Amino acid sequence: MDSGISPAAEVISAPLFDIGCMASDTVLADTALLRDGVECELALRIDHPLPFGGCTRDDVMAAMGAVMPAFELLCSRLPARFASPREHIVADCMGHGAVVLGAPLRDWRTLEFDKLRVTLWADDAPVADKQGGNPFGDPLLAVALLANHLARRGQALAAGTFVLAGSHTGVHRARPGERLRCVFEGIGEVALNLREAAPTTSEEQTHAGR
């Protein structure tokens, strides 16, 4: 589930799909999935049911099982992209193209989520280095707000769901050939390769040389 705040300070959300989830350090074959950029986010995994309405940050603390560093790849399908009406952006899954997930951290309870340092690297060059930066302040609060937003619509965050709780770095316009690496201090890192995989000798080429 992807969550965010509209310009009118309303919570907006859209589903993420399993088919669009990739592991860290993958080589991305379809770079159109990030034609509108890439964001560094935290993926918060919900392992236990949340209250149906009236959800608080403490409820999220009790229900959350792990946190993962993540890249969200942005790929709007709308003619006006992110300048489109809000309801169109929501229908377009908020321009979500795919998500790349790092390893889950289960020992997260002592972290100060509103003060985390995050660094984004493109190859060996840092392109973003921020303290905090989440639009909600505390991403756990984002999950509570999302749970209440969904409850008003008769929906719930099921156990096993993870929530992308907003960008910590803003949008990076990646270039072909880059290797992106995002480090959340105290949590871990996630990487994405935009370089083409090394070519392999095909069956036809092998036979042609005999």
Image: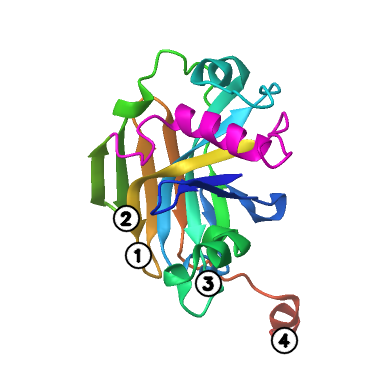
Local packing at callout 4 (Cα closer than 10 Å; few below 14, some 14-19, many 20+) is: few
183 to 50, vertically: above or below: below
- Residue 144 seen by the camera: yes
Q: In which quadrant will I find the N terminus?
A: top right
Q: Return the mark for residue 208.
A: 4
The label shown at residue 196 is none
Queried whether the magenta region covers residue 154, the answer comes back as: yes
In the image, the segment drawn in magenta is 132-161
In three-dimensional space, the C-alpha distance between marks 1 and 4, rounded to whole angstroms, equals 42 Å
Residue positioned 54% across, 59% down in the render: 94
Identify which amino acid the numbered label 4 is placed on.
Ala
Q: Earlier in the sequence, mark 3 or mark 1?
A: 3
Quarter of the image with the C terminus is bottom right
Q: Quadrant of residue 133?
A: top left
Whether residues under marks 2 and 4 lie with C-beta atoms below 8 angstroms apart, the answer is no
Q: Looking at the image, tell me whether mark 3 or mark 4 is earlier in sequence order.
A: 3
**Judging from the image, what secondary structure is the residue with disc 1 in?**
loop
CB of mark 2 within 8 Å of CB of mark 1? Answer: no
Residue 32's mark?
Answer: 3
Mark 1 surroundings: few (<14), some (14-19) or many (≥20) residues within 10 A: few
CA distance separating discs 2 and 1: 13 Å
Name which residue type carries label 2: Asp
- Please name whichever residue, 58 or 85, is drawn nearer the observer in this view of the structure: 85
Q: Secondary structure at mark 2?
A: loop
| Element on which disc 3 rests | helix
Residue on which disc 2 sits: 123
In reply to whether residue 142 is colored magenta, the answer given is yes
Nearest the viewer among 137 and 19 is 137
Real-space CA distance between mark 3 and mark 4, rounded to the nearest whole angstrom: 34 Å
> Which circle, 3 or 4, is nearer the viewer?
3
Residue at the disc numbered 1: 173
